[in-house]
Amino acid sequence: MRESSTKLLYAVPNFINEKEYGAGNWKAAAANRLALDRAGVTYTHIVFDPDNPATLLEQMGPDITHLLMEYSGWPELLDKLRDRQPQTKIFVRTHNAEAYHHFHRKIIASKRDYVSVKNWWKLIQLARRDAHCRQVADTLLGISEWDDQHYWGWLRGKANIRYLPYYSPWPYLRPEVDIQAWNHRRHAIVSMGGNFDPSGIANFVNFDRLATGLSERMAERWAYLLTWWSQWHRKVPKVSEHIEIVRDCREPWDLLCQSRALAVLTPLGFGFKTTVLDGLAAGCHVIVLPKLADRLPGQVKDLCLVGDPSRKQDIDRLAEALSAPPKPHSLNQHLYDRVAEDFRAMFS
């Protein structure tokens, strides 16, 4: 058997580390490592400091033929690499439509933020940097089909844009955890708390509305659990008496595998809401808002419960749907297989 001539370096920025355990960027990188292993691709995994280009360039041996980098934020670093090793094929994993994401996270927070010249200048800079990244890279591996079509495809540049879906790595990272049968699950809806930014605030405000509405509608008593990681936040949001704030959730996957539903109730943010796939993989009903549903891939959206908790008719429909188990599927395994096969085709 002929040995492959491909020499792959998989580069991950140093802020994606064990302190971020359970965060979206941590899960996305973990999923890529698992898929590379599944594909049988030989690679070297390195960590680099985005503020110190030498931490990447010094690990780029002349025999490296392919680079796979997490995030699109450092086109100048890619320029240095291109000048040094023009033969290396550069693949960049895009996590967000960064300019749009900044608009949702920073600019719409308040009237003061909206009129801030500094915030708008930052948005322009992010768009320029992403366009620069597309000009330097050979391929952008998008985590979101919507972002690929409505953001990355509009930016000038030569890089091919290729959709590389997220799948949940949890079933493979924690195979010892049983995915509970529906009848053995707790009557609980979980919402994974975000931050005190517009997206996080929208999530817990809508979760409060959902809990209030369903509490008045459901015959059985349900628990409404808002996880709020203590290592990230000392203060917690103000919510109604219907919601229990879970301060210690060291293993989010374990909680999902024991609960009947997950609520992801923000219309804001770009990239891909990784928790949606985590919930589906865990056998939960996953409740999303209509605006978020419109940015999900069709096969994911079809498995979700779409509703607005501020509308009584949607609360009634959600209550009925939650009385029965979700339809069975193997979407997460299918996506895992697909990503592994994509990596095999790219790097073998």
Image (cartoon, rainbow, N blue to C red):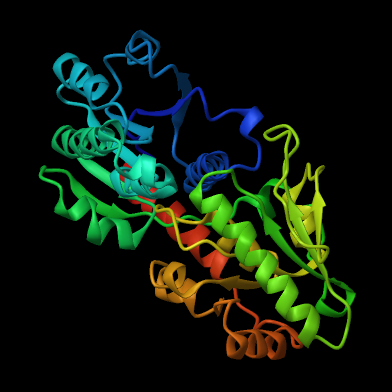
Query: Could you tell me residue 293's position as x and y percent?
Result: 45, 72
Query: Could you tell me residue 194's position as x and y percent?
Result: 60, 48
Query: Could you tell me residue 33's position as x and y percent?
Result: 52, 39
Between 152 and 224, the one lying in front of the other is 224
The structure residue drawn at horizontal position 23% and vertical position 38%, both measured from the top left corner, is 130
Does 53 sit above or below residue 173?
Answer: above
Residue 177: which quarter of the image?
A: bottom right
Is residue 42 in sight in this rendering?
A: yes
Left or right: residue 328 versus residue 307 is right
The structure residue drawn at horizontal position 38% and vertical position 47%, both measured from the top left corner, is 111
The structure residue drawn at horizontal position 53% and vertical position 30%, both measured from the top left corner, is 16
Total numbered circles = 0
Does 255 sit above or below residue 185?
Answer: above
Screen quadrant of the N terminus: top left
Left or right: residue 80 versus residue 11 is left
Query: Could you tell me residue 96's position as x and y percent?
Result: 37, 47
Between 263 and 278, the one lying in front of the other is 263
Residue 305: which quarter of the image?
A: bottom right
The structure residue drawn at horizontal position 55% and vertical position 58%, both measured from the top left corner, is 202
Screen quadrant of the C terminus: top left
